[in-house]
Amino acid sequence: MNFTEILKYLGTKIFQIIKWILFLIVYLTASSMITLSGAFGNKVSLAQEVLGMGLIACAVALAFIDWRYHTQLQTNNPRHFGKNKVNVQKILLIFGLYILMNVIQITWSILISKNIISFPTNQTDVEQAAMQLPIWSNLFAVFIAPIFEELIFRGIFMNYFFNKNNHFNNFMAILFSGVLFGLAHEPKPDLNLLMYSALGWVLAFTYMHFKDIRYNIFLHFLNNLASVL
């Protein structure tokens, strides 16, 4: 690879990083509007208006990100991601992975109860939002957030940065996807970051193994539903 090719490669990757960050900003901006509506609890009319705008923003943002993800696959899809038929073996494996995520969550809870790990700030924010806007916050956490986060942290991320179908790229895609997922929920370098990353690794493995983003969205949905319940 000569100097010109190196510059071209770096330019492409920098542009992809900027675009990926913009997708993340679009998601966070749309979701924050729903959270913001809970701050106007005493002003029902205003809260409803902000909530309505937030739901519209989420719908537009989700449609845009989903369109971009499928456009990526049409342009370059060496791993043949797409829609695969569901069978009993796949269902059993999904629930096995769900049990693994529960083991991580239970271990995490035990470590928190023993004061080995502090209660994660992200979870505190989620619980506070649920108190301000219980129905919509929970619906967003269970049904909408998993779709956004799987499209961004698994689908678009892996296609941008680790799109070669070999063992090294597959491993690195799972590793970095999980770490970025962890950092998005816990930016401090502590054990909470490791736990969030572990959940991200399970979801990333699911996407890589099934080669169908619906499976890791469903797994993410199950995990968030258990947290809400």
Image: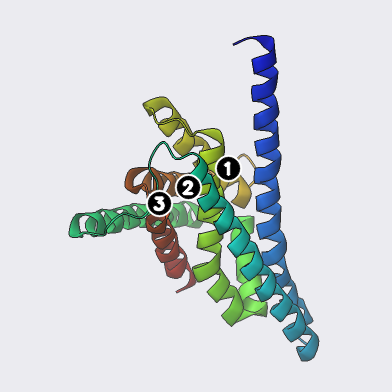
Task: Tell me, yes or no, whether the two marked residues, 2 and 1, touch with CB atoms within 8 Å.
Answer: yes
Nearer to me, 223 or 188: 223
Label 3 to label 1, Cα distance in Å?
Answer: 18 Å
Q: Position of residue 205 (x, y in %)?
A: 38, 43
Outermost residue on the top side: it is: 2
81, above or below 7, in the image: below
Q: Is residue 116 visible?
A: no
User: What residue is pinned by disc 2?
Assistant: 200
182, above or below 168, in the image: below
Q: Residues within 10 Å of mark 3 (few under 14, many from 20)?
A: some
Q: Residues within 10 Å of mark 1 (few under 14, many from 20)?
A: many
Residue drawn 65% across the image and 59% down it: 27
Label 2 to label 1, Cα distance in Å?
Answer: 8 Å
Q: State the mark number for residue 104.
A: 3
Q: Earlier in the sequence, mark 3 or mark 1?
A: 3
Outermost residue on the left side: it is: 88
Q: Which secondary structure, mark 1?
A: helix
77, above or below 131, in the image: above
Q: Position of residue 203 (x, y in %)?
A: 42, 50
Q: Position of residue 86 (x, y in %)?
A: 26, 59
Task: Tell me, yes or no, whether the two marked residues, 2 and 3, touch with CB atoms within 8 Å.
Answer: no
